[in-house]
Amino acid sequence: DAGVTQSPTHLIKTRGQQVTLRCSPKSGHDTVSWYQQALGQGPQFIFQYYEEEERQRGNFPDRFSGHQFPNYSSELNVNALLLGDSALYLCASSQENQPQHFGDGTRLSIL
Amino acid sequence: EDQVTQSPEALRLQEGESSSLNCSYTVSGLRGLFWYRQDPGKGPEFLFTLYSAGEEKEKERLKATLTKKESFLHITAPKPEDSATYLCAVQVYNFNKFYFGSGTKLNVKP
């Protein structure tokens, strides 16, 4: 049974560019959440998607947007990249009221 | 403001030396508290969920407990393979946000 898968594993971008990260949830999971994890810090909640709608959002600017598809997979888009956006981006999936299971993340580096 | 604080930031133990990690939280209404283990270059791996004060969960050398203000992760007779960063997270009632602490980096030396 495949767990949460994310792609790509690593990505290098320059300031001002745009990036799209992808996530396939664990089989049977319908809820996807995205997190940003800076080095040495805990994950910071970006937003959560359920039934193709953004259900909850953390304290991130509108440059961060997302989408969930009918098959429950999800994308995270970040526009106008800043140096401070360099981080590990984690996707987590779950069923309602169940613990979240995480992928291994996408390491995004901004030059 | 909802907040999660973990201590210590780092902990070095000798193999077999038991200890505890702390997670204190200030939230408007706790729906659940979660413990995760994170290895370098990997995503967090789920360990436990605790829902109410007094609840305890165990898995191998790990035992998690919960009070109204904090949770402890007790590690009994740790082995080098227990070395990792341990994260706790809280979920707040009526919201689907999860707040994570900064983690405790555990290093168990043989």
Image (cartoon, rainbow, N blue to C red):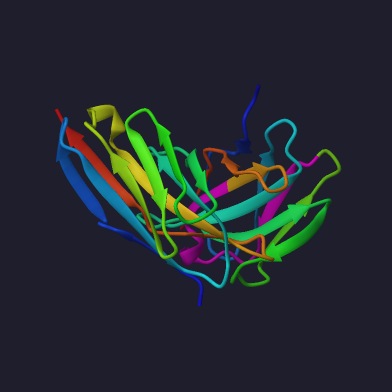
Q: Name, please, the residue furthest toward the front.
A: B54
The image position of residue B60, as x and y in percent, is 37, 28
The image position of residue A8, as x and y in percent, is 59, 39
Q: Name, please, the residue furthest toward the top.
A: A1
The image position of residue B34, as x and y in percent, is 50, 49
Residue found 17% across the figure and 44% down from its top: B12
Residue found 83% across the figure and 52% down from its top: A52
Residue found 40% across the figure and 48% down from its top: B65
Q: Is residue B56 left or right of residue A9?
A: left
Q: Is residue B83 left or right of residue A29?
A: left
* Quadrant containing the N terminus of chain A in the rendered view: top right
Q: Name, please, the residue furthest toward the bottom.
A: B1
Residue B103 belongs to magenta span: no
Foreground residue among A44 and B104: B104
Foreground residue among A52 and A15: A52
Q: Is residue A82 left or right of residue A63?
A: left
Foreground residue among A50 and B68: B68
Residue found 37% across the figure and 46% down from its top: B86
Q: The magenta stretch spans which residues?
A: A72-90
Q: Name, please, the residue furthest toward the right.
A: A70
The answer to whether A8 is drawn above or below residue A87 in the figure is above
The image position of residue A12, as x and y in percent, is 51, 49
> How many callouts does the rendering have?
0
Q: Is residue A104 left or right of residue A1?
A: left
Q: Is residue A84 visible?
A: yes
Quadrant housing residue B56: top left
Q: Is residue A109 visible?
A: no
